Amino acid sequence: SFKEEKSTLHKSTMLFPILLFLGSGIIDTVLKYLELNFVPQEDVSIFSGSLFGIAAFFGFIVLLIQHIKQPSSFGIKNLVAGILLGIPNYFSIIFLIKSLQTKGFESSMLFTINNVGIVVLSTIFGVLLFKEHFSFKNKIGILLAIFGIILVAVS
């Protein structure tokens, strides 16, 4: 993600990739633990709905606190965008849990393919929708990620 036109790299900048790495690992681990111990196959959609309901509850609390501290405009477009983003995320969690419950899928393989696939698809959308330009290093990183998916899937 380092852009070549920036000549300096501050140490504090490395905090975000580290937090992303740890947060993603914690989420994957907790999701696998919950799936293994608490989510029957017939209750996957209820579990996923509960996750999103809890997230919506805390999201509204954060919005309320922010609005009390500094009034801001929260329009209908924000709500519509949240719903449009939430729908595919809801079904992706259902798909991920059902995949974890499928015999023959190792969670290590599944999480690797899922996470790298998200990065690759986000990159493709960035190029197509936002006309993003990538450095040579960025392109090599994406190619290595795709190669990594292939290696994990073949093993």
Image (cartoon, rainbow, N blue to C red):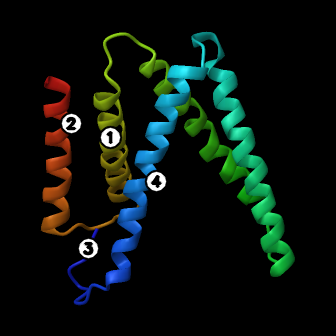
Asked whether, in this view, residue 5 is left or right of residue 101, the answer is: left
Q: Is mark 3 in CB contact (under 8 Å) with mark 4? A: no
Label 4: few (<14), some (14–19) or many (≥20) C-alpha neighbours in 10 Å: few
Cα distance between the residues tagged 4 and 2: 21 Å
Q: Give the label, 3 or 4, closer to the camera.
A: 4
What x and y, as percent, mark residue 45?
65, 22
The N terminus sits in image quarter: bottom left
Q: Are marks 1 and 2 in contact (CB under 8 Å)?
A: yes
Identify which residue is drawn at 82% across, 80% down: 69
**1 or 62: nearer the eye?**
62
**Quarter of the figure that contains the C terminus:** top left
Label 4 and label 1: CA atoms lie apart by 18 Å
Query: Badge 2: few (under 14), some or many (20 or more) residues near its Cα, within 10 Å?
Result: some
Q: Report the front residue among 61 and 124.
A: 61
Q: Whole-Å distance between the Cαs marked 1 and 3? A: 20 Å
Tell me the SS state at disc 3: loop
Residue pointed to by mark 1: 117
Residue 27: % across, % down: 49, 44
Q: Which residue is rendered at x = 67% and y = 51% of the image?
A: 82
Q: Which residue is mark 4?
A: 23
Q: Which mark is residue 149?
A: 2
Q: Can see residue 42?
A: yes
Residue designated by label 3: 2
Q: Is residue 25 left or right of residue 62?
A: left
Q: Quadrant of residue 9?
A: bottom left
Three-letter code, disc 4: Gly
